[in-house]
Image (cartoon, rainbow, N blue to C red):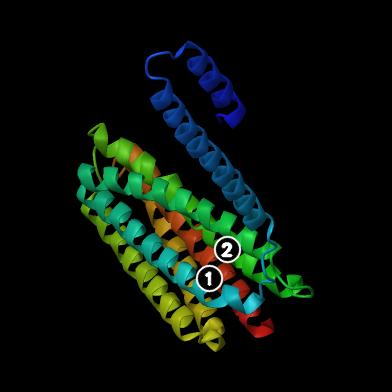
Amino acid sequence: MYYPSLFIRTIETILLKADVYGFVVILLALILVAFVSYKYIRNNNSSSSDATKEKKPAPAFDVKDMMEPGSERIRRHILETSKIYIMIIQGFADGNEKQLKATCKKVSYLEKSMRRIKEDLFNSFTLLSAGKYDTAHYFIQAMDYLGELTSPLKQIAQPVYSHILKQHKGLTESQKEDILLLMEEVTGFFNYLVHIEKEQKFDAVPEMIERQKYIVEMIEALRMKQIERLIQGQGKTRSSILLLECYAESKNLILFTINLLKAHRDFHKLS
């Protein structure tokens, strides 16, 4: 920043050397000094004002202020998780390289998005009113489980994409039927979960737990079926191993989702 004193010294030097246009030089010098002084004072006042604004303490934040935006974020994240899961499984079954490449990008974006959400949540948590931390703990726990939903997607998206990219043999027809059947059950589970979240029908949690058990048992049955195929030499080894990984991560996805639902239910009960 330029200071008025520096310009004044410069103007004095000019005045000493001015002989022909003395009067004009003096007039211009006075105008210049006045302008620079005005800018200097205004900038200082503006900086002081901004500093005052930054130091102003933020108002106390109530836990209820986290409920609606938090619930909306949970629903959006679950829906996006479901869409990506469908794209991965369908892309694997169809051998669709372009679709699988897109899923890898979506998983990466979802992971970054969840990181930003957690940062925002932490900032909100620090603004909570006194005595609200115990209740908010359940909400933070719910968001942690929400973040874990990205991990199973990440574990299968890139390996499946690499497999198809290298033009390895795909799934057999019977393998496709099995994995697509599971995909329908998992996406149906997610759709019902979003409905529960939106309507806040947390009394349906026991029903969701039963559906979870059914899908987990289904996954175990499909896994054993695939192991028997491997023993009998049916299908390609690489594709079969990837299929088993898809089963394992599908199971993790379902387990994380129920933990998320329980934590969010507890948050609403205590809010």
Image location of residue 56, percent across then percent down = 68, 60
Residue 154 can be seen, yes or no: yes
Image location of residue 70, percent across then percent down = 53, 70
x 52%, y 53%: residue = 116
* Horizontal relation, residue 106 to residue 263: left or right: left
C-alpha separation, residue under disc 2 versus residue under disc 1: 9 Å
x 60%, y 49%: residue = 45
Say which element carries label 1. helix
Mark whose residue sits in front, 2 or 1: 1
Say which element carries label 2. helix
Amino acid type assigned to the residue bearing label 1 in the image? Gly
Q: Nearer the viewer, residue 183 or 270?
A: 270
According to the picture, the residue beneath numbered tag 1 turns out to be 70
Number of the label disc, if any, that sits on residue 143? 2
Image location of residue 46, percent across then percent down = 57, 49
Residue 152 can be seen, yes or no: no
Number of the label disc, if any, that sits on residue 55? none
Amino acid type assigned to the residue bearing label 2 in the image? Met
10 Å crowding of disc 1: few (<14), some (14-19), many (20+): some
Q: Nearer the viewer, residue 207 or 24?
A: 24
10 Å crowding of disc 2: few (<14), some (14-19), many (20+): many
Q: Quadrant of the C terminus?
A: bottom right
Image-quadrant location for residue 121 = bottom right
Image location of residue 260, percent across then percent down = 56, 68
Q: Nearer the viewer, residue 116 or 162?
A: 116
